[in-house]
Structures are given as structure tokens and as C-alpha cells.
């Protein structure tokens, strides 16, 4: 399972795997992608984050040549999209948000049939299947029907299926949605293996911990625009105070009106919890010692804090 990843030539920096400039797309008079710029380096995991309706799925479809843009330029492996989308997609594997495994086929047959879409011979696909099953921790399950698999097994099979053509770029749309924590950690381990092999990943997720663990760089998308880009920890340091104290329980309102606003740079309330952002949490924590009805969690700022600050806490449908 050795990928052919674009490399350096004559000492020059490699061309990006995916380059997007000024991308725009509107539906019914509403611009859902409004001037997006992206660039993916070979061998990195790049995250595309955003609330529902931010334009992530449309952006992915544009980047795969599945949707015609209204404006902008897209190159995938140096090929212009959508003009040469079919040739470019031969080097891409896709893990959709919803599993599309064929329930009438066995695990092995799902891999075999999918490989044929890329023009691979049955012999070539059959030679790859043992490694794919081992990668997905499904060795010995080749003849199992899809209905006999757990949710985590189906997700690992969908990931293995995306590798059947030995792709250089793997696009993952919400790869761990609906999985329990154990299954999610298994998927994270497999994705780390892929980047260690030099493959490039483009990941969308609503799990901020997932993005922070896996992504070397990311962009936050909202209302069709990129509102922040960079390395996760650098973005957090740039936009968020380093310490967070979450407080909830009896007497929250009285405490928030006095101590919280005095001892923190910024406070936000979400439901029954007050989030206090500060550079020095000691005075905040000390103010809670004689308030037995209140509970608190003191932690470092994380990617979820960044996401909520940039995109807001209101629900999106």
C-alpha cells in the first residue's frame, strides 16, 4: 500500500496537491461558497471546519469536480477542474459521511466491485484485498455480509474501500459521526497511519477534538467564507485566552454578576454554564471556594473554544 505522493523536484517546493483560488458557487440567488481559497500540501491532514450550512459539502464537491463553480480556479494534482476531473479523481479516495456499502455483497465483494470503477483488474484488486482488510482490522471477515458488521466495522470498511485505488489524496466527510469513543479512536489511529505513509487527507468534522488531534492545518468556513486558517494551536493562541473556567450549579447568576466579570477577560453563557476566558485563572478558582453549590472545570483553551468564538454559539439548521 505504497502511495505515489508528489515530491520535491530539483530542490523546488512541491506543487500543492489541491489548490483553490476565488471559488464561488450560488444556488437560487444565495452564494453558498463566496471566494474560498485553499491549498493542501502533500502528506498533511488538512481540516475544513464549519457549522451546518457553512458551505463545506459544496466546497468538497467543487474540489472533486462534481459541481461546476460559478467562478474561481481549482487544480487537483496539477489538473484543472472540472475539465480534467475524471483523470484527477483516479488518484483520490472518498469516505462519504453516510456509508454506501452494498448490503447484498460480502465485505470482499464490496471492495472488488468498487475497485472496478477505477478500471482495476479483478486480479489486481484481489491482490490488494488482504492488506486492506488487515488495515481495517477486518481480516477473517472477508466473506461476512454487511448486515453482520457493527457500525465501527462498516466505517473501517468504508475507509478501506476508499484506499482500493491506492490514492494519494483521501477526502473524509465526517468520518467518525455516530461512532462510540472506542471506534472513533481506532479510526483516528488508521488516519494517522495514512499520513505517516505520506498520503494527504482532507477532513471535515464536527468533532473539534478530532480536528485538533489529526490536522496539521485547518480552515474555518462560515457563510461560504474562510474566516480563519492556520495550525490549530497557533489559531487557538491567536484568538483565545489560554485558560478557561467552566462554572455551573446553584448560585451561578450571583457569582457571574460579581466574580466572573471581575476576574476574567471574557465571559460567555451557554445554557446553565458560564465560560470564563482568562490569562490567570487563580482568582476565578479562588472565588469559587466558598460557593459549595457551584461546580467548575479549569482547563486550557481548545479548538472548540476557537470554533465557537468565530462562528457563534447559536444553533444552525
Image (spheres, rainbow, N blue to C red):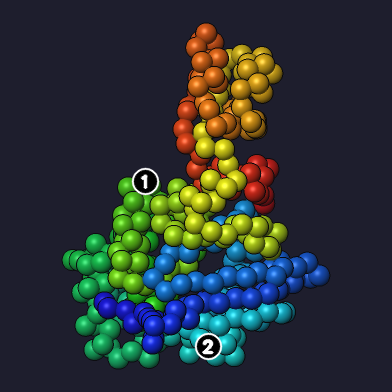
Looking at the rendering, which quadrant does residue 39 occupy?
A: bottom right
Judge depth for marks 2 and 1 and give the one in front. 2
Mark 2 and mark 1 lie on one chain; the one further toward the N terminus is 2
78 lies above or below 172: below
User: Residue 79 shows which numbered tag?
Assistant: 2
The residue drawn where x is 61% and y is 22% is: 263
Query: Toward the viewer: 125 or 168?
Result: 168
In depth, the one of 43 and 269 nearer the eye is 43
The residue located at (46%, 33%) in the rendering is 299
Label 1 environment density (alpha carbons within 10 Å; few <14, some 14–19, many ≥20): few
Residue 262 image-quadrant placement: top right
**Residue 239 locus on image (x, y percent):** 60, 46
Q: CA distance from mark 2 to mark 1?
A: 39 Å
240 with respect to 211 (left or right): right
Q: Which residue extends farthest top?
A: 290
| Residue sitting nearer the eye, 109 or 182 | 182
Residue holding disc 1: 181
Reply above or below: 105 against 215: below
What secondary structure is found at the residue carrying circle 2?
A: strand
Residue 189 location (% of width, % of height): 31, 57
How many numbered discs? 2
Q: Quadrant of the N terminus?
A: bottom left
The answer, for residue 92, to whether it is visible in the render is: no
Instruction: Residue at 32% x, 79% y: name it.
Output: 3
Question: 279 or 38, which lies in front?
Answer: 279
Amino acid at each position: 500500500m505504497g502511495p505515489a505522493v508528489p515530491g520535491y523536484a530539483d530542490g523546488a517546493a512541491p506543487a500543492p496537491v489541491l489548490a483553490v483560488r476565488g471559488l464561488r458557487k450560488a444556488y437560487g440567488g444565495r452564494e453558498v461558497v463566496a471566494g474560498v481559497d485553499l491549498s493542501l500540501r502533500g502528506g498533511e491532514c488538512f481540516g475544513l471546519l464549519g457549522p451546518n450550512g457553512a458551505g463545506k459539502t459544496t466546497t468538497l464537491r467543487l474540489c472533486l469536480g462534481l459541481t461546476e463553480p460559478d467562478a474561481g480556479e481549482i487544480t487537483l494534482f496539477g489538473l484543472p477542474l472540472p475539465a480534467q476531473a475524471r483523470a484527477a479523481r483516479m488518484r483520490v479516495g472518498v469516505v462519504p459521511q453516510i456509508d454506501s456499502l452494498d448490503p447484498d455483497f460480502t465485505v470482499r465483494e464490496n471492495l472488488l466491485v468498487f475497485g472496478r470503477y477505477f478500471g482495476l483488474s479483478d486480479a489486481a484488486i484481489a491482490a490488494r484485498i488482504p492488506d486492506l482488510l488487515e488495515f481495517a482490522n477486518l481480516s477473517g471477515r472477508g466473506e461476512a455480509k454487511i448486515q453482520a458488521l457493527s457500525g465501527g466495522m462498516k466505517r473501517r470498511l468504508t475507509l478501506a474501500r476508499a484506499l482500493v485505488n491506492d490514492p494519494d489524496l483521501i477526502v473524509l466527510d465526517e468520518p467518525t459521526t455516530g461512532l462510540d469513543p472506542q471506534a472513533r479512536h481506532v479510526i483516528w489511529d488508521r488516519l494517522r497511519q495514512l499520513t505517516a505513509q505520506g498520503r494527504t487527507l482532507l477532513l471535515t468534522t464536527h468533532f473539534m477534538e478530532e480536528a485538533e488531534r489529526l490536522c496539521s492545518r485547518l480552515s474555518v468556513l462560515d457563510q461560504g467564507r474562510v474566516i480563519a486558517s492556520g495550525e490549530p494551536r497557533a489559531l487557538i493562541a491567536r484568538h483565545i485566552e489560554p485558560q478557561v473556567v467552566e462554572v455551573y450549579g446553584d448560585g451561578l447568576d450571583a457569582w457571574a454578576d460579581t466574580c466572573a466579570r471581575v476576574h476574567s477577560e471574557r465571559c460567555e453563557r451557554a445554557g446553565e454554564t458560564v465560560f470564563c476566558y482568562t490569562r490567570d485563572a487563580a482568582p476565578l478558582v479562588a472565588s469559587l471556594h466558598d460557593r459549595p453549590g457551584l461546580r467548575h472545570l479549569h482547563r486550557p483553551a481548545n479548538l472548540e473554544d476557537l470554533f465557537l468564538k468565530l462562528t457563534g454559539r447559536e444553533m444552525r439548521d
